[in-house]
Amino acid sequence: MTSTLTDRYLSATLRSVPVARRDEIATELRALIADMVEGRTSTGEDTATAEREVLTELGDPAQLAARYADRRLQLIGPTYYLAWQRLLILLLSFIPAIAGVTVGLVEATVSDNPAGAIGAGVSVAFNVAVQVTFWVTAVFAVLERLGTPLNLPAWNVDQLPDRPVERDVTLTDVCASIVFLVLLIAFLPWQHFQSVMGAGDRLPILDPALWSFWLPALLIVLVASIGLELAKYRAGRWTWPLVAVNAVLNLAFAAPAIWLLITDRLLNPEFVDQFAWLRDGGFDTVARISVVSIIVITLWDVVDSAVKARRSAR
Amino acid sequence: MVASLVALRQPDYGYALLQRLAGHGFPVDANTLYPLLRRLEDQGLLTSEWNTEESRPRKFYRTSDAGEQVLRLLLDDFAAVQASLATLIEGDPR
């Protein structure tokens, strides 16, 4: 009983079965299909329908072949999953960032286009992350298929993390703060070269004279704030030394900013001239709102850190 | 798998085994049973020979000596599990 449907099913199944056993499996399956069809026709079904139903019951040829070949129908199984996940998280936690920052810095020094450099850095970081993920996964998928033992040391209790994982400072908060700080740091050089506001020419928003001292000083304070965020995450909670450093850094940022605002030295005079409403007293309003905002935010941040330190010290 | 090893103490071919198992309340799909028989044969738990006397060639499987030993271990395990369950259900006082 040879028919095209059965033949097609067999060839589809045998395609991915080891060559050595192909003939044997073919003969066996052919007999099975014939038996199953016979079982159905004996209850009055016609042969064509019975054949269709039998083949449907046997299911996807690829799956049947995989069962014969004892092939795994999964990319990465439970043996390798945790190792894959840990390695991937470890690599993704620093490689894309390093690549992105390096390319960004090189781009920023080679071409005088800071905004473009940030874009290039982000795009390189993203590409590197995709590449790392792909290759790590590909290697583990191969290991899974070869069944290579990883020979990792067995887990033991000494690997337990020191502290209970509940922490006051979450990774999300720290990341959000760092992203904000980085954007702020990026803003300072960007505003100097920007041509978005102004008639197509480069028009620094802040007074270029400030680059001689105040802007670099503020940059240092901002970079130090990133360090503080990292230290805070390492500690897992606010401690009194961290609160003190935080207060100092906040003050080091707020005091010069407020002083520059009040003494009218923050904005570039040319920039102010471009906008009529800034010239005609608008700047005073902006300055007043900014000073109040800075004071409120600074106070709130310092008080908040102190309250949290007090709570976790208990 | 245990059911197949028990049933194949008496030699049989795939399709007949399938029906026998189904008759005893073990509904198995052909696409699971056939590869399983292969694997058991590879592991030496089953022996097989082709029978070409009938209308179509059939591969007859039989539980081997090694298969018999493994089967005995498995049946003991089952008995142990069953005994444990029984005591658990009865609320064995400890």
Image (cartoon, rainbow, N blue to C red):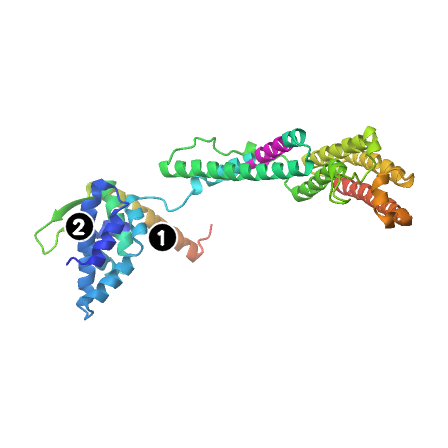
> Label 2: which residue?
A27
Residue at 65 percent of width and 38 percent of height:
A116
Relative depth, front residue between A145 and B23: A145
Q: Quadrant of the C terminus of chain A?
A: top right
Q: Which residues are magenta?
A: A92-104
Residue projecting furthest to the left: B53
Q: CA distance from mark 2 to mark 1?
A: 40 Å
> Label 1: which residue?
B82
Does residue A24 lie above or below A225 as drawn?
below
Dominant SS of magenta comes to helix
Residue at 43 percent of width and 32 percent of height:
A150
Q: Are marks 2 and 1 on the same chain?
A: no
**Chain under label 2?**
A
Q: Residues within 10 Å of mark 2 (few under 14, many from 20)?
A: some
Residue at 63 percent of width and 29 percent of height:
A106
Relative depth, front residue between A76 and A133: A133
Using the rendered image of the protein, determine whether residue B31 is visible from the camera's viewpoint.
yes
| Secondary structure category for the residue under label 1 | helix
Q: Residue A10 in the image: x percent, y percent?
A: 23, 52
The amino acid sitting under disc 2 is Thr
Q: Residue A134 in the image: x percent, y percent?
A: 48, 39
On screen, residue A312 versus residue B33, left or right, reads right
- Does the stretch in magenta take in A100? yes
Q: Residue A256 in the image: x percent, y percent?
A: 86, 35
